[in-house]
Image (cartoon, rainbow, N blue to C red):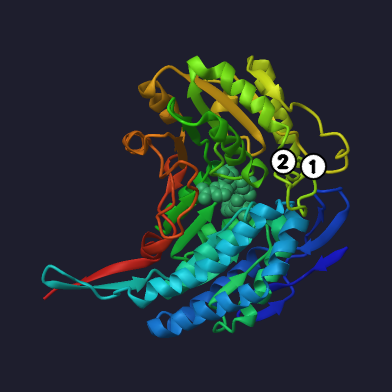
Amino acid sequence: MKILDKIYINGEFVTPHGTDTLTLNSPLNGEPLTQVRLADGLDTVNAVAAAKAALKTFSQTTKEARIGHLKSMHAVLKRRRNELISVMIEEYGCPLRFTTLLIDGAIDDFNNMAELLEHYDFTPRVGDSQVRLQPVGVVGVIVPWNSSNGFIATKVSAAIAAGCTCVVKPSELSARQTALMMECFHEAGLPKGVVNILNGTGALVGTEITENPDIAKITFTGSTAVGKIIAAGAVETMKRVTLELGGKSANIILDDADFAAAIPQALSACYINSGQACIAATRLLVPASRLDEVNRLISAAVGAIKVGNPAEADTAVGPMVSQTQYARVQDYIRLGIEEGATLLAGGLGKPEGLEDGNFVKATVFTDVRNDMRIAQEEIFGPVLCVIPYQDEADAVAIANDSPYGLAAYITAADKQRAYRLAAQIDAGRVCINGAFHDPLAPFGGFKQSGYGREFGVYGLDAYLEPKAIIG
Ligand code: NAD
């Protein structure tokens, strides 16, 4: 078993004051993988102090210097790409095909921010005034386990580009991925204290970050429940807050679409990251008059979805990250059956031959009503809900009848029709005809999916405080 007993503060790998330990088991077979020693509140205070001290000089560095730091981080991540991929697969169980996308995205984040910075004007003139865009200050970065290093890359690259310093708290379930990221930041040779990283719990480290008066901004990705706790706690010191929260994204297939192509794509869009993705297209909205055809196509396509070893290139669905997550998904499958949805594929229990790991069957419920809990709540596993709609207006109403508003998907032969529909959807991102991600487009949620945006220029703006100098 690997022992991880270091955190990264002020450019050094130090032993935490915290003495609590946590054992992480393999999601593939339940074997103990890692024992991690967790940081506590005092470690967090020390990390904040280091970030605050570093801010004095880092906030004054030139744009060119910051571009240099971003490029060197890009180079380190590129060099260590294979390690980043394999540790993510081993610790988290993310299928190779998706892990590769996420890690390549993380590597690109640093380069994209460097390129954006080249042309970014930190002192634009507005009216008769000069506006100075200043770094907001020390940033608390809190991220979940489902793409831990990906989220760190998106947030920290923007923070560095703005001239901010960071205290990073990933999920304690991602301890090995976190340890590798510490090494990468160290190797990139960033000035001491610019990036500090702690393995610790939300209750201790997360709470200290939320309440510490020397932190000016929190950027959080995670559940809506924890986002609300952070937003409420941050009010006391008026921290700026960016919240990337949960989702229950609708995927609308219009009647002119090529159903034979759209249905397998819809399964992939739901089962992305084994269903443990905020942007997963978990509600498939199809014309009621074509429901039988859709059910037939799904039954034929779902057999081709391979659930199994995430290291294999053709695996679409790996294990759930933990036994807790496995049990949560099972509870939702049970609930769907109780609520009267029709189970079309998958269901309770583990797939044959995969009994040792946290594997869930690729599951589809059909003829689901949008007011059922399985259609309203985030399951975070490979469970698709097929919901019939009567006409376009009904499809929009169902898509918008959700507490969430993170992403939506539309498939149509007539792209103009899809654009017209996109304008009516309450979500921060609408992807058309299989499109998935644009690293320069803003990303964030409407409604209870959070507030603020990441990526590109909107992402950078979120780390800057505009000051008007008038006269
Ligand atoms: P979570 O909210 O339980 O935890 C996220 C992070 O918050 C972890 O680091 C955790 O330790 C920390 N935390 C927990 N309690 C805290 C507290 N009281 N104060 C401060 N920090 C605290 O989420 P999770 O289970 O790790 O991840 C899954 C959730 O993340 C899902 O709801 C998913 O939709 C969401 N998510 C959102 C996005 C997005 O971009 N919108 C992306 C990925 C995941």
Residue occupying the point 82% across, 61% down: 35
Position of residue 25 relative to residue 119, above or below, is above
Mark found first going from the N terminus, 1 or 2: 2
Q: CA distance from mark 1 to mark 2?
A: 8 Å
- Quadrant of the image occupied by residue 348: top right
Q: Is mark 2 within 8 Å of ligand 1?
A: yes
| Residue 191 screen position, x and y as percent | 54, 84
Say what secondary structure mark 1 lies in.
loop
In the image: residue 112, left or right of residue 21: left
Task: Assess whether mark 2 and mark 1 are in contact (beta carbons under 8 angstroms).
Answer: yes
Circle nearer the viewer, 1 or 2: 1
> In the rendered structure, which amino acid carries the disc numbered 1?
Asn
Tell me which amino acid carries mark 2: Gln
Number of other residues with Cα within 10 Å of mark 1, as a class: few under 14, some 14 to 19, many 20 or more: many
**Vertical position of residue 68 compared to residue 229: above or below:** below
Label placed on residue 295: none
Q: Residues within 10 Å of mark 2 (few under 14, many from 20)?
A: some
Does the closest atom of ligand 1 sit within 8 Å of the Cβ of label 1?
Answer: no
Q: Which mark is residue 358?
A: 1
> In the image, is residue 352 above or below residue 60?
above
Q: Which residue is mark 2?
A: 325
Decide if residue 112 is in sight here: yes
Q: Nearer the viewer, residue 282 or 259?
A: 259
Residue at 57% across, 31% down: 260
Query: Residue 89: x and y, percent?
Result: 74, 56
Q: Secondary structure at mark 2?
A: helix
| Residue plotted at (70% across, 52% down) | 94
